[in-house]
Image (tube, grey):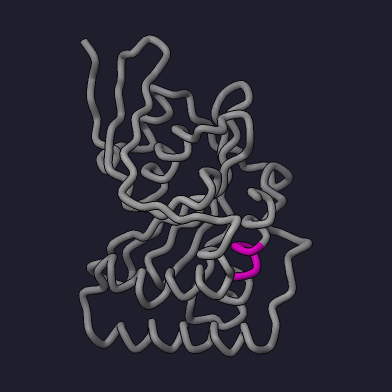
Amino acid sequence: MVQIVQAKNVTLRSLIDDFQVQLVQDRSFFPEWQGNLPEVSALEKQQLERIRDGFINLLDYPPLLEDVIRMTVVDPLLFLGGFYLPPFYVRSEESIEIQTEDEGVLITGSLDTLVLKNRLWVLVVESKRASYSVEAGLAQILAYMLASPHPHQPCYGMITNGGSFMFVKLVQDSSPQYAVSKLFGIRESEDLVTVFSILKRLGELVI
């Protein structure tokens, strides 16, 4: 009998047990976020500072809902990075379906993430409180990345709750392996600049 699981309810444990997803802690597995990043112009830094100030202003008016975080933080980042222009295209609410080889588990769901060219995902974690961890979105974004139409190419993702950012890389050559970046915080101006630069770098890789 096939077990059906909603993507939003998937856990890292289930991905490990059903799809043999493995965490790689060797830093050389995910060098894309660690160096050779695009420069960020002075004008872009000014815009990033405004995004930061806007988010900090939101903290006075909780809860921080997903749509508000997207409008205040994610959409401006993507707009500034040129992700709404060709050759990129953005989709949301895309249904997915992945299953194990023996068809014992079927994961279905509606994608509340943004998909950029089928190899770069951006997931927004709805945060009822500012301290809610981006780790809460890790299993969900991995589930969607496993359903990539390009399983022989690396996939990348960014998870954010508005205040924190984490990048993810998934490779599926033999068995699915993933790694994550360090955690970046929006309160640190230089962190947001680095986040933006990493996002631009990943965009270059998936074109």
Farthest-out residue, front: 86
Query: Looking at this view, is 183 or 153 the one in front?
Result: 153
Q: Is residue 177 left or right of residue 11?
A: right
**How many numbered marks appear?**
0
Q: Is residue 190 left or right of residue 130?
A: right
Farthest-out residue, right: 36
Query: Looking at this view, is 95 or 70 the one in front?
Result: 95
For the point 28% across and 65% down, the residue is 66
For the point 38% across and 9% down, the residue is 102
Against 9, residue 193 (above or below) is: below
Query: Looking at this view, is 120 or 36 the one in front?
Result: 120
Estimate the x, y position of residue 110 in percent, counting from the top left.
Answer: 28, 43
Against 203, residue 94 (above or below) is: above
Quadrant into which the N terminus falls: top left
In this rendering, does residue 135 appear at all? no
Against 25, residue 64 (above or below) is: below
Estimate the x, y position of residue 80 in percent, counting from the top left.
Answer: 55, 75
For the point 32% across and 52% down, the residue is 112
Q: Is residue 85 magenta?
A: no
Q: Is residue 138 left or right of residue 7?
A: right
Residue span colored magenta = 196-200
In this rendering, does residue 33 appear at all? yes
**Most common SS among magenta residues:** helix
Query: Looking at this view, is 200 or 20 the one in front?
Result: 200
Estimate the x, y position of residue 173 in percent, counting from the top left.
Answer: 63, 25
For the point 29% across and 38% down, the residue is 7
Q: Is residue 190 left or right of residue 71?
A: right
Q: Find residue 35 and report its image quarter.
A: bottom right
